[in-house]
Image: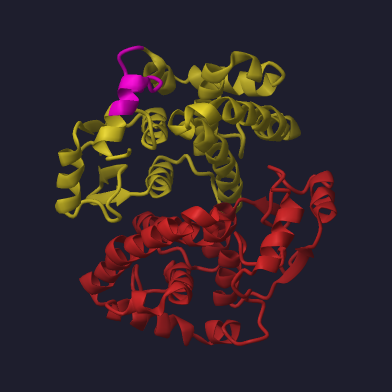
Chain colours: A red, B yellow
C-alpha cells in the first residue's frame, strides 16, 4: 500500500534529520510520530518494529526500515538521487560518508563532557577547514559542474545540510569555499528545498538543553 | 584498465578486513600495499590519493576509493552480492549496518583504556546476546532460507559471518543459543572461495596483538 512514509523519532534532529532533508528534497510528503517518553520507545520495541531495538525507524513501502544509511539509500534509489550507475554510486557513497564523518562530530558535540568541549570544537573546526570542505570544494572545481556527481542532484543534499550546520557553528568557516557556497545557494533555491527551509516546515531547530534532557530520558543515558 | 584491486592499509584487520572478506568471498584476487611507518601515510596524503586524508583506500577500476562503505557497496554491486532490487538492498543495508554497529564495538576494544576494558567487554557481550544475534537469528528463522536476503548470498551474510568469527574469538559460548547463525557460519565458511580465505597463508589478518597495536598507533600517530 502506498501511503506517506512514517518517521518514528523524538523531536530533534539527531539521526533522523538527514532523512527529513532527503525526503523533502525528493518532494515526498511524510508523517512523523514523535517519541516523547521512554514508554513510547518501549512500545515500538515491544511491537517488534525495530530490528535492532533502535530508532530511527521509517515505515515505507510495507517495510519497517531501521539504520539511517539503509533508509537514506532506499529513498535515494527510489527517487533517482543515487547516480546513474555503480561508479557514480561509489563516488556518491564516498562523499556521503565524508559528510557523515564530519556531521557525526558536530551532532555528538552536545554530549561532550564540558571539560573536553573546547578541544572537541577546535578539532571540528580544524577538520572542517583543512580536510572536509577543501575536499568537496576540490570536487566541484575539478569538473566545474553544478552538482558533485554526474551533473545531477544527489548527495549534494547531505552536503548542503552539513554546510548549514557548519554555518551554525561558525559562519566564517565557509569563507574560503566559493564553490561550496554556490552549491548551498543553488540547492537551497530548488523549489522543494526552499519550502523545507521556510519556518513552519518539518525541519528541526538546533538542539537545546531541553531536547538533550528529553533524549536522556527517552534513551536512558 | 583492469588489474587487481590494490588495498592500501596497514598490516592488520582494522577497517580494511571486511573489504578483504568481501573480495575474497567474491573470488576476486587483490594486492595489498602495507603502510609500515607514518611517512607511508604521509606519502599517500601528499599524493592526493586520499580524499579525506584517511585509509582504507582501494584502487579499483580506475578509482581511488576511500570510505569503507563506498568500497564495500561498489564491490558488492560489481560482484552481484547486493540483492536483486532496491527492496532487497534496503534489507541488506539494514543488516549490514547492524553488523557494523556491533563490529565497531569489537574493533575499538583494543583502544579502550585498561580500567574501562572489563565494563566494555561486558557491554559487548550483552549487546551481542540480547540485541544483535537474536535479531539475525530471527531473520533466518522468519523465512527458513539459507541466506539472510532473497535466498542468495549477499554482502550481509559475508559481513555477518565475519562478525561471528570475531564474536567467537571473544567468547565461543556467545554463539551457543543461535543454531541458525551457527548454520549460516558453517555454510558460508564452506563456500569454496571463503574456505580458501579461511586457510592459513591467505590474506586474512589475525587478531590484533600488543605489537600490532603499537605499530598502528605509530603509523596513525595515535597517542
In this rendering, position of residue B71 left or right of residue A178:
right
Residue that appears at 28% across and 72% down: A140
Instruction: Tell me where residue A193 appears, x and y as whole percent.
Output: 54, 82
Q: Is residue A204 visible?
A: yes
Q: Quadrant of residue A30?
A: bottom right
Nearest to the observer: residue A137 or residue A217: A217
Say if the magenta span includes residue B201.
Answer: yes
Say if the magenta span includes residue B103.
Answer: no
Q: Is residue A60 visible?
A: no
Instruction: Tell me where residue B73 appears, x and y as whole percent.
Output: 43, 47
In this rendering, position of residue A152 left or right of residue B115:
left
Nearest to the observer: residue A116 or residue B209: A116
Nearest to the observer: residue B128 or residue B96: B128
The residue at the far top in this view is: B200
Q: The C terminus of chain B lies in which quarter of the figure?
A: top left
Residue that appears at 21% across and 42% down: B41
Instruction: Tell me where residue B44 appears, x and y as whole percent.
Output: 18, 46
In this rendering, position of residue B15 left or right of residue A66:
left
Residue that appears at 32% across and 49% down: B66
Q: Quadrant of residue A56?
A: bottom right
Q: Which residues are magenta?
A: B200-214
Amino acid at each position: 500500500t502506498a501511503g506517506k512514509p512514517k518517521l518514528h523519532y523524538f523531536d530533534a534532529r539527531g539521526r533522523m534529520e538527514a532523512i527529513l532533508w532527503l525526503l523533502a528534497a525528493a518532494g515526498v510528503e511524510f508523517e512523523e510520530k514523535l517519541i516523547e517518553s521512554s514508554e513510547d520507545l518501549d512500545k515500538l520495541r515491544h511491537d517488534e518494529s525495530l530490528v535492532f531495538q533502535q530508532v530511527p525507524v521509517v515505515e515505507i513501502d510495507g517495510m519497517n526500515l531501521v539504520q539511517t544509511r539503509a533508509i537514506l539509500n532506499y529513498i535515494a534509489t527510489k527517487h533517482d538521487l543515487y547516480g546513474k550507475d555503480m561508479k557514480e554510486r561509489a563516488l556518491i557513497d564516498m562523499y556521503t560518508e565524508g559528510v557523515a564523518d564530519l556531521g557525526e562530530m558536530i551532532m555528538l558535540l552536545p554530549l561532550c563532557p564540558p571539560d573536553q568541549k573546547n578541544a572537541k570544537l577546535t578539532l571540528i573546526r580544524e577538520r572542517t577547514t583543512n580536510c572536509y570542505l577543501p575536499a568537496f570544494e576540490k570536487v566541484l572545481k575539478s569538473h566545474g559542474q553544478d552538482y558533485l556527481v554526474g551533473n545531477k542532484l544527489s548527495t549534494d543534499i547531505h552536503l548542503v545540510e552539513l554546510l548549514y550546520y557548519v554555518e551554525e557553528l561558525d559562519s566564517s568557516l565557509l569563507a574560503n569555499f566559493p564553490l561550496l557556497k554556490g552549491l548551498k545557494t543553488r540547492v537551497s533555491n530548488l523549489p522543494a528545498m526552499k519550502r523545507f527551509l521556510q519556518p513552519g516546515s518539518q525541519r528541526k531547530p538546533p538542539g537545546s538543553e531541553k531536547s538533550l534532557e528529553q533524549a536522556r530520558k527517552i534513551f536512558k543515558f | 584498465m583492469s588489474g587487481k584491486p590494490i588495498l592500501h592499509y596497514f598490516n592488520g584487520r582494522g577497517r580494511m578486513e571486511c573489504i578483504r572478506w568481501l573480495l575474497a568471498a567474491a573470488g576476486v584476487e587483490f594486492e595489498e600495499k602495507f603502510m609500515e611507518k607514518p611517512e607511508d601515510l604521509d606519502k599517500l596524503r601528499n599524493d592526493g590519493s586520499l580524499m579525506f586524508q584517511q585509509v582504507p583506500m582501494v584502487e579499483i577500476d580506475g578509482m581511488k576509493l576511500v570510505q569503507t562503505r563506498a568500497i564495500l557497496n561498489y564491490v558488492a554491486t560489481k560482484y552481484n552480492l547486493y540483492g536483486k532490487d532496491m527492496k532487497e538492498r534496503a534489507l541488506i543495508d539494514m543488516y549490514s549496518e547492524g553488523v557494523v554497529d556491533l563490529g565497531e564495538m569489537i574493533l575499538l576494544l583494543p583502544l579502550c583504556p585498561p580500567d574501562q576494558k572489563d565494563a566494555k567487554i561486558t557491554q559487548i557481550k550483552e549487546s551481542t546476546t540480547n540485541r544483535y544475534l537474536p535479531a539475525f537469528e530471527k531473520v533466518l528463522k522468519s523465512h527458513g532460507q539459507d541466506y539472510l536476503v532473497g535466498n542468495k548470498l549477499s554482502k550481509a551474510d559475508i559481513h555477518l559471518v565475519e562478525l561471528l568469527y570475531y564474536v567467537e574469538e571473544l567468547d565461543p559460548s556467545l554463539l551457543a543459543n543461535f543454531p541458525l547463525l551457527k548454520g549460516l557460519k558453517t555454510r558460508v565458511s564452506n563456500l569454496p572461495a571463503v574456505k580458501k580465505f579461511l586457510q592459513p597463508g591467505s590474506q586474512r589478518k589475525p587478531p590484533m596483538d600488543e605489537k600490532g597495536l603499537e605499530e598502528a598507533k605509530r603509523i596513525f600517530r595515535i597517542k
